Image (cartoon, rainbow, N blue to C red):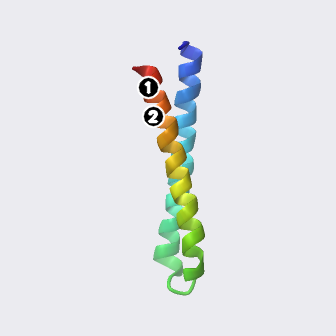
């Protein structure tokens, strides 16, 4: 794998980590500020957070495998 390809994978990991962190903050804000009134939002935000974390995990695994 070329250095350019590794840099792209690393960039993808960082981007996905940022997106996962943003979704986690949304979930945190929902819990801290909006519940119990906004309980209907839990499933959507939780699913989006899960999906973002899964995308980060997959990108990270690709990067680690390519780096080894």
| Residue 26 in sight | no
Query: Eyeballing the image, is 46 above or below 56?
Result: below
Q: Residue at x 50, y 50 (%)?
A: 53
| Residue 54 in sight | yes
Query: Eyeballing the image, is 39 above or below 46?
Result: below
Q: Residue at x 46, y 75 (%)?
A: 32
Question: Mark 1: few, some, or many residues within 10 Å (few <14, many ≥20)?
Answer: few
Q: Are marks 2 and 1 in contact (CB under 8 Å)?
A: yes
Query: Eyeballing the image, is 49 above or below 36?
Result: above
Q: Position of residue 61 (x, y in %)?
A: 45, 34
Marks 2/1: CA distance? 6 Å
Farthest residue to the top: give it: 2
Q: Position of residue 45 (x, y in %)?
A: 57, 66
Secondary structure beneath label 1: helix
Farthest residue to the left: give it: 68
Q: Position of residue 39 (x, y in %)?
A: 54, 81
Q: Residue at x 51, y 61 (%)?
A: 25
Q: Position of residue 67 (x, y in %)?
A: 43, 21
Which label is found at residue 11?
none
Question: Mark 2: few, some, or many residues within 10 Å (few <14, many ≥20)?
Answer: some
Q: Which residue is mark 2?
A: 61
Please tell me in which quadrant of the rendered image residue 8 appears.
top right
Q: Which residue is mark 1?
A: 65
Where the C terminus falls, by quadrant? top left
Please tell me in which quadrant of the rendered image residue 48 appears.
bottom right
């Amino acid at each position: 794998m070329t250095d350019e390809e590794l840099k792209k994978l690393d960039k993808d990991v960082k981007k996905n980590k940022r997106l996962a962190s943003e979704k986690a903050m949304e979930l945190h804000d929902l819990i801290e500020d909006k519940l119990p009134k906004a309980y209907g939002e839990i499933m959507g935000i939780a699913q989006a957070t899960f999906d973002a974390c899964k995308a980060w995990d997959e990108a990270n695994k690709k990067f680690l495998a390519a780096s080894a």
